[in-house]
Image (cartoon, rainbow, N blue to C red):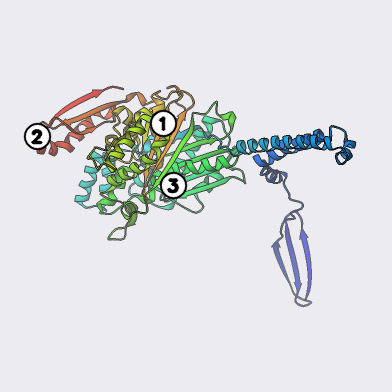
Amino acid sequence: MNRDSIEMEKERLTAEMAFKDSASAVIKIRPRLPDFLQSVKLEYVKLGYGYLRYPSMILMFALMIPLSIVTLVYFTGLKWNRNSELWTNQALRLESIDVVLSLAGSLVVFFLLGLYFAKQSRPVYLVDFACYKPEDGRKLSVNSFMKVSEDSGAFTKDTLEFQRKIITRSGLGEETYAPRGITSSPPHLCMEEARAEAKAVVLGALDSLFQKTGVKPKDIGILIVNCGVFNPTPSVSAMIVNHYKMRTDIKSYNLGGMGCSAGLISIELAQNLLQAIPNMYAIVVSTENITLNWYFGNDRSMLLCNCIFRMGGAAVLLSNKARDKARSKYQLVHLVRTHKGADDKHYNCIFQREDEKGTVGVSLARELVDVAEEALKTNILTLGPLVLPLTEQFKFFVTLVRKKISKAKVKPYVPDFKLTFEHFCIHAGGRAILDEIQKKLQLTDWHMEPSRMSLHRFGNTSSSCLWYELAYSEAKGRISGGDRVWQIALGSGFKCNSAVWRALRSTPMNESKGNPWKGEIDKYILILILLLDTSKDLPFFYASAISLNTVPICFFSYLHCISSKLIERQAFLRISLRFQ
């Protein structure tokens, strides 16, 4: 069988012809491999040489080689012919040995100093961040939520009443957001709608971030995305790279299944990468996708997620460039992670599973608040020595010694973290968790206001809620240069993570570009509803974070929720209003 081959250069195709006989032939056309020698792009070669720009290489060429040359010249006295005298002149030889030892010692000192500065941890700056604010058409009021549940026909009368009771007590307001797949009638829960939600949230936050900072997508060297229960293929991080046509050597990561605490886990990963790679920008995107994770069943432990989780996301720009310090908002000081997953109670506290009928949902255990408190306690014991004043550490240590050694029945001393931090951003996982953390850390309503307001306005947006809270403090004009911010994230596993930031400059109230609270921060006040037990005159219930627009609704909702407690405990109601 005769063969002939014809190559078509422009189309990069190869045609092969095989003759079976004198009357017939078979033609096969296949794509030809590119000629790599002809298709080399200098930009990729440049990237390869770019990896050589590390401190060790710079130190070697900029410090060691010049010092070696100077040593050699000094040793010979600028006269190369004197080398032969070292073997005949003993005085010159002894003098030369002293010079060599001195120079060798200096060389070692220079080397160690250079090595020390090369190994120094690079500061990580938070240049800016942006939170996604959905359009008004995505708002989901309490009545709208109940209508979606009722119209679905998936819930019994008892579970509908249970949902109404939970959402009324949850601390969520009338202007939270839900994706189109859930609010449509009937709900359209599919991969297409889930991708649409992810694109709207993630790209919306990133567009705002790029606009605020002036940084171009091509400048980003590290991209980290965390999304708990939505992990498609290609990943969300790949979707971002594709949309913005980012560089080919970008280091991208997609963290999944790590719950509401994954935002700070992503920050730590970015910190480690920025300390290893010089002159780099990193972006962290935190979000959650609820389209495919809305539960249509009657297991009450799984219905809690429907009541508190809402649509949201945030994008954070980090840098290790020294020139970015002047324009950055914060500097990362500490990041402490605590993982209690070795204990079964903590591991099973938040669990994705199927109910009795095979419907998948995320179950929240009754012990959630206790588990969160224990994880926070462990995290605080690790963070405390890093941030607390010596006086607070001494008081805590004395109390601990008295309790452990002398077996004295003393009340555990809770350090006053208000002496260390000016601002607190606590994961807005629900009203009960916020109440417990405020009680344990002895925080004021002013300190808790960003968390409660964020829960009220946007709901539980999972790992991104910490940034809505920080945005609230900025919109109120509360951040001043030198202030310290403590972010506390809680999530499945069970994990508790803390991040400590130091404000590098003040954030004025009019700097609201890309802030989700823009145009509506003035309508939020702090309203405190306090119940007093007439027998002990002690408060046992309060609620805050109410918008002026929803004061009547929230007020009567709270009265409805606590009416049974009023009767049982023979308490009376006292309302305290404090305008912020």
**Which label number is shown at residue 485?**
1
User: As shown in the figure, which amino acid type bears the numbered disc 1?
Assistant: Val
User: As shown in the figure, which amino acid type bears the numbered disc 3?
Assistant: Cys
For residue 169, above or below residue 479: below
Q: Secondary structure at mark 3?
A: strand
Dot in front, 2 or 3: 2
Query: 10 Å neighbourhood of mark 1: few (<14), some, or many (≥20)?
Result: many
Which badge, 2 or 1, is on the more N-terminal residue? Answer: 1
Q: For this view, does 569 lie left or right of residue 494?
A: left
Q: Which residue is mark 2?
A: 570
Please, which residue is most extreme toward the front here? 90
Query: Which residue is rendered at x = 76% and y = 34% of the image?
Result: 99
Residue 127 spot, x, y in % from top left: 52, 31
User: As shown in the figure, which amino acid type bears the numbered disc 2?
Assistant: Gln
Q: Which residue is mark 3?
A: 227
Please say whether residue 216 is visible from this viewpoint. yes
**Which label number is shown at residue 35?**
none
Pointer 2 with pointer 3, Cβ within 8 A: no
Dot in front, 2 or 1: 1
Q: For this view, does 185 lie left or right of residue 512?
A: left
Residue 22 spot, x, y in % from top left: 79, 77
- The quadrant in which residue 438 appears is top left
Residue 126 spot, x, y in % from top left: 50, 33
Q: Secondary structure at mark 1?
A: strand
Q: Secondary structure at mark 2?
A: loop
Please say whether residue 188 is visible from this viewpoint. no
Structural distance between the alpha carbons of marks 2 and 3: 46 Å
For residue 563, above or below residue 187: above
- The quadrant in which residue 58 appears is top right
Dot in front, 1 or 3: 1
Which badge, 1 or 3, is on the more N-terminal residue? Answer: 3
